[in-house]
Image (cartoon, grey):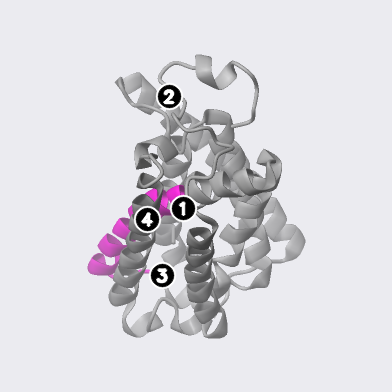
Amino acid sequence: MPYNLRIEGAASSAPGVATPTNSSSRAVAPVWHTVVVLLALLGLSAAGAISPQAFPLGGWRSRAAGYTFVIVFEWVVAAFIAWSVRSRGTRISDLVGGSWAYPRDFLRDLGIAVLFLLVCGFGVVTGLRFLLKATANAGMHTMLPNNGLEMTIWLLMSLTAGFCEELIFRGYLQRQFEALTNSVWAAIALQGIAFGASHGYQGHKLMLVIAVYGSLFGVLAHWRRSLRPGMLAHFMQDGLGGLVGRYWLR
């Protein structure tokens, strides 16, 4: 909860797509900072894996409080990242990339997001889930919203995930891993693995599916040199998934 293929000249020539001022091969934060971010993400994931029915924090007894905790947690991690990258002269807007200077820019990214969801979210991910026989566990059933208040906070949590998780994994970790490995493909794979590992409450099979899905989000971000289409797709995936899933999974 709910991130550019390197083709020379392609991304930079696309209208409304801004190339970040910092080279993607340069680290935007010290290694210790990345370790702290990963430990925080994996620590929360481990707590969910140990007791999936209690995630998020109290399960069915306190869904609204659990959603609120996730919102606060992800914004704290995003703020921690913003604090560190700023010390090296990088802005959050540099990590996000892209531009919505005109309505057509937003509509283009929205169209890309919808196409990505159709091809990757419903095509690739559904196929992987079928092959792995990966089904929702009890933790996923208990965390779905049940009433108007919970649905409202769920949508706020989905908005947070769309921005913060794309910033954390595709904007920050992917940049860091590329700097450490000197390989964009290794960076995409590593942040995807970290993304999957951060969803411990969903069980090991779905964690693998989510890792692949996160890698596809990484490819999208690298190709577009922008997190904006991925942010839109992530929000729609989580928001609609929760609202529809409350009827589908129950």
Q: Mark 4 points at which residue?
A: 78
Q: Real-space Cα distance between discs 4 and 1?
A: 7 Å
Pointer 4 or 1: first along the chain? 4
Q: Bin the neighbour count of mark 3 within 10 Å (Cα to Cα): few under 14, some 14-19, many 20 and up.
A: many
Number of the label disc, if any, that sits on residue 18 = 2
Q: Mark 3 points at which residue?
A: 144
Pointer 1 or 2: first along the chain? 2
Q: Real-space Cα distance between discs 3 and 2?
A: 37 Å
Q: Name the residue under label 1.
A: 168
| Residue in the image at 65% along x and 53% along y | 190
Pointer 3 or 2: first along the chain? 2
CB under 8 Å between discs 4 and 1: yes
Question: Height in image: 193 above or below 57?
Answer: above
In percent of width and height, residue 114 lies at 49, 36
Q: Which of 158 and 148 is in front in this view?
A: 158
Pointer 2 or 4: first along the chain? 2
Q: Real-space Cα distance between discs 1 and 3?
A: 24 Å
Pointer 1 or 3: first along the chain? 3
Identify the amino acid type marked 3.
Answer: Leu
Magenta range: 145-168
* Residue 158 drawn in magenta: yes
| Residue in the image at 33% along x and 56% along y | 79
